Every structure is written in C-alpha cells, then in structure tokens.
Image (spheres, rainbow, N blue to C red):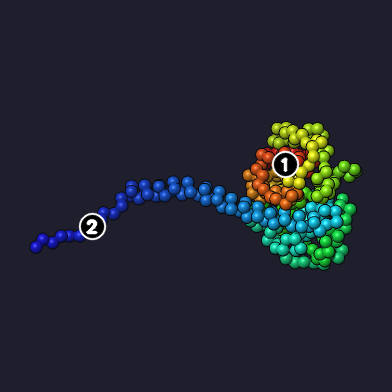
Amino acid sequence: MKTVCPHRRSAFTLIELLVVIAVIAIVAGLLLPALARAKDQSKRTYCLNNEKEMGVGSQLYADDDPQGALAGTDNYADDDLNWLYPAYVRSLNIFICPNTQDIISNAPIPLGNNQPFYSRNDSGVSYADRLHGNPTIILDLQRIAEDDPNYVVLPKRGHGTSYEVSGFLNGSTPNVGPGYNIRKTQKVIVGYRYQTEASATYNVNGRRVFCNVYGQRASLSKMFIMYDGDDQIYYNGKYSNDNYPDWIDNHGAAGGNFIYCDGHAGWVPQAQYPALWAIGTDESEYTVVPF
C-alpha cells in the first residue's frame, strides 16, 4: 500500500511579505485621511448640536426678557454666557466644543459685587437684571478660553467657553454715540436697516472684498448671535486673525458653526466669513492676514 505524504505549504518569500506590507501601507494611507475627515465631521456635528441648544436657549431668554434681547452681554466685545446657564442651558458641557480641550470649572459663586469681564455697559441694564434673577455666576463662563492668559494653542486648551457672543449691532470702541453699539433684540433686528458705508471694505490677504449692505433691511434668520470662538492669539511670533478661521481655532481654517437670531444654527465655510460678518454685525472693519 502506497503512503501518501501530506501536502506541505511553502512559506511566504521575502518579496511576497514586502508586497503584502506595501499593500497594507497603501490601504492605510487611503483610509486614514478618510477616517480623520469622518472624525472631524463628527465633532463638527456635535458642536453644531451644542449651538442648536444654545440657540433655543437664546430664544427662551428673549421671550423672558423685557427688551426681547437675544443675549445678556453688556457690549459688543463681551462673550459672557452666564445669562444662559442654568435657566436656559442646563449643562456646562454644551459650552465646550468637542474639537477643543477647554475647561469650565463648575464652581458657582454669589453674584454679589462681581463685575462682568468687560466693564463697559452699553445695554442699559444691570448685570443682575441681565442674568434674569440668577443669584450666582461661573467665572469660566465670563470669557472664551482663547482669552485665558494660560491658554495652550496645542491642544487648544484653556479655562473658558468655546463660543463667542455677538450681542450688538455696529459695535465700536471709539464710537459710542447714536447709531453705534445697538443691542440685538427681536424688535430691533426686525426693523433694522444697515448703517455702514455704501461699500463696506474687507481686506482679506491683500484682496479687497466689498459687501454692500447699506440701507438693506436686516433679518433674524441671517443675523447671528453666537458662533465658534475665534479671538486673536499670539503664537510663534505672529498674531492669528480675529473672527476669521485659522488652523488654531475650534475647527481649524475650514470654517465655523454659527447661531442665528431666529434660533437656528449652521456651518459657515471660511470663504463666506467676510460677507457673513457684514450681514451679522453691521461692522465695516475687517482685515485678514496670512497665518
């Protein structure tokens, strides 16, 4: 009887192993960027959901406010969000963009004699009244994290919120007379006509952009009230752009999420920022430099 030997499988050669490794590297190279984009998109959506909740809170705040104000800030530069918490937004996590490592310490303190982060009050209403009776404040809600003196650009971490407030129209520091620093209320926006010069000039990386909004009627659905934090930061010998997305901001240079005065929220790509700024703030001063 003939004995049949079992078949012995030959081992991979070195060349075959190298080919397999090369194929795996190519596939990984194709998949990793897609996975990174998917992860970024997921965080962008999470952030948008945060802003939708803040948008609802803004509408509830306006309904309770004697002036119908859409925000409880005291001037156009103020980003205090204590007016939303805890009556209109119940979780502090809502004020943190998932693309950052910002920190808000849950340490309420009595309102007492504590003053707003910005002292100039253009609202005509006291801090206590703008908080709608809330007897406490949280210091980390008074500013965005990028204004923290100890802010760390990488990995985007500081004490404060991840979002800014745009509570006034035609906001200005040197100009404080009639027509400037107008509080955004439901009634004001419905009847507002833009007051900037016939062609508001925006300088974007050496290119002049004209946004002619003079005399046009404003709209609650086009004018914004809050947005992804984007203050100017000094880093590696240069200043980043204020209110124009750079790589150091919440979602990098791609753009940011905005909350509009009718309560809805949406994504705005970088290229649309200058025009949005004209429509959303009625401020004509806007300069962007490479960063």
Q: CA distance from mark 1 to mark 2?
A: 71 Å
Q: Residue drawn at (47%, 46%), measured in percent from left and top?
A: 30
Task: Name the residue tied to disc 2.
Answer: 8
The answer to whether 131 appears left or right of 233 in the picture is: right
Element type at marker 2? loop
Mark 2: amino acid: Arg
- Residue extending farthest to the right is 177
Element type at marker 1? helix
Task: Name the residue tied to disc 1.
Answer: 276
Residue 85 in the image: x percent, y percent?
75, 61
Residue 82 in the image: x percent, y percent?
78, 60
- The answer to which image quadrant residue 84 occupies is bottom right
Mark 1: amino acid: Leu
Q: Quadrant of the N terminus?
A: bottom left
Front disc: 1 or 2: 1
How many neighbours does mark 1 have within 10 angstroms: few (below 14), some (14-19), or many (20 or more)?
some
Residue 160 in the image: x percent, y percent?
73, 57
Instruction: Give the mark, 1 or 2, whose residue is nearer the N terminus.
Output: 2
Query: Is residue 46 among what the camera can see?
Result: yes
Residue 108 in the image: x percent, y percent?
77, 66
